[in-house]
Image (cartoon, rainbow, N blue to C red):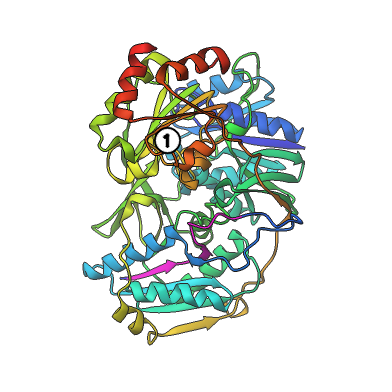
Amino acid sequence: MKVLVAVKRVVDYNVKVRAKADGSDVDLNNVKMSINPFCEIAVEEAVRLKEAGTATEVVAVSVGDKSCQEQIRTALALGADRGIQVETEGSVEPLEIAKLLKGIVERESPDLVILGKQSIDGDNNQTGQMLGALAGMPQGTFASEVKIEDGKLNVTREVDGGLQTVSLNMPAIVTTDLRLNEPRYASLPNIMKAKKKPLDVVSPADLGVDLASHLTLLKVEPPPERSAGIKVESVDELIDKLKNEAKVI
Amino acid sequence: MSTLVIAEHDNASLNPATLNTVAAAQALGADIDILVAGAGCGGAASAAQAVAGVRKVLCADNAAYEHQLAENVSLLIAELGADYDNILAPATTSGKNTMPRVAALLDVAQISDIISVESADTFKRPIYAGNVIATVQSSDAKKVITVRTTAFDGVAAEGGSAELVAVDAVHDAGISSFVGQEIAVSDRPELTAAPVVISGGRGMQNGDNFKLLEGIADKLGAAIGASRAAVDAGFVPNDMQVGQTGKIVAPELYIAVGISGAIQHLAGMKDSKVIVAINKDEDAPIFQVADYGLVADLFEALPEIESKL
């Protein structure tokens, strides 16, 4: 069984992002970039399937400029076998990424595609589902458990009310939620080995995709600031303030 | 111009998130129809008919739609959506699951999690865990949108008399099936709709200690939430998580107990009207957004609060 796993290069989750002074975009100068945390969980799940003998090959793909090869190498260091970079410039919208990934799916014919449920930059939560629709594949989104039984993929999903389990025909798509697994750290020998693993570069044209733009970013701005309130000295004071000042209890 | 709102429901009744979504639809200024797709969903469809300001309720009642499987429902919405300029759903796990498939089938972008409608094609939405608000303009003829429900006050659940239209279209992709679910049963209000929310974090130390929040929640009619740290540690189940990738809440009163205040948690609650933080670390970032901060050991403060309420 072949597993395709998608990874995205994003601002590190510890960085507090700010809007540029002119409001044209966010300021990403000199900030630390990392693999999107949900994508890291996706890589871990794929590698575990390989270690369990269920998967035979794990292919990591990323869409972006040359710098995203760094995140593909991270995936290779975590245990993916080879990488593919779809070379693009500037920001690419989720629908277009889904079209590019569909092109990769047609080339690679994976039995399972694992993606993060959302990236922590755009917070869109779209790409996996869009790929599902375009490729005619079923999806187990927001997964907290993935099992393969009798040729079907059983996915337990984190939904608003609790947990839901669905059974999917394969090939299928999984998008990861936080509790699916705890990603490992790449060891130094594996980081060294990852440098020698194959990494192909393809263009959107190679995949027959003509990139389009549907949305224009007009402005970015900071959210309304909440100013810090006061510290109360005691439980009595707190209850008094809530009753008589805020009037919320 | 017309807008189709996808109802969130359990076949028997309508989830209030639908009312917030209709409110967002009203801001677009077009005629509003609601789609209720389910099985044995007559109860939800009747409730949708009563919603204020709705023209028609489309009811697609078929076994294929019983569990809202995205593979099936997205085909239905994409077909019906041909007649509409806008298709809106609440940004619940159900809306997030289905709508991107609809957008891809229609070859348009999805605009996720909008918090305001600036004009018929321009919307505001939070990015980077709400640290930045983006204003985006869509050039697509058809807009597929999910709505952050806390950003729109729901329309009245009563007072409307929409026409009911049965939809016969059956789309069963045959590639997925429902196996089962574990849905938390609670007498407390639903987290995203509760007027008061009290949440515990890593400082609670274990799941048993969440009982300390229950007595206060009972007295205040509050829902109980948790930070990601508490869920990851296995103290409480995932449906209690408040934050960037969990539930977004904006109650009248939010009480954060033993929660440090990571960006990802603040993203889920900082639009609450009044925020109280109880933490023994006086430098915890949560105090920077709290209206009232109490630096105290929660194991002493919580029983005292419960006894004095």
Q: Nearer the viewer, residue B33 or B136?
A: B136
Q: Is residue A70 left or right of residue B90?
A: left
Q: Is residue B218 above or below residue A52?
A: above
What is the magenta range?
A2-17
Question: Farthest left residue?
Answer: A52
Question: Farthest bottom residue?
Answer: A196
Residue B124 sits inside the magenta stretch: no
Q: Nearer the viewer, residue A209 or A79?
A: A79
Residue at screen point 54% across, 20% down: B47
Residue at screen point 45% across, 38% down: B65
Q: Amino acid at mark 1?
A: Glu
Q: Is residue B146 above or below residue A49?
A: above
Residue marked by disc 1: B66
Q: Is residue B247 left or right of residue B149?
A: left
Q: Nearer the viewer, residue A177 or B202?
A: B202
Residue at screen point 33% across, 66% down: A46
Disc 1 crowd, CA 10 A, few/some/many (<14, 14-19, 20+): some
Is residue A171 in sight in this rendering? no
Residue B78 locus on image (x, y percent):
60, 47
Q: Is residue B118 above or below residue A52?
A: above
Q: Is residue B256 left or right of residue B87?
A: left
Is residue A124 in sight in this rendering? yes
Res A190 quadrant in image: bottom left
Q: Quadrant of the C terminus of chain B?
A: top left
Res B231 quadrant in image: top left
Residue A197 locus on image (x, y percent):
38, 84
Q: Secondary structure at mark 1?
A: loop
Q: Quadrant of the N terminus of chain B?
A: top right
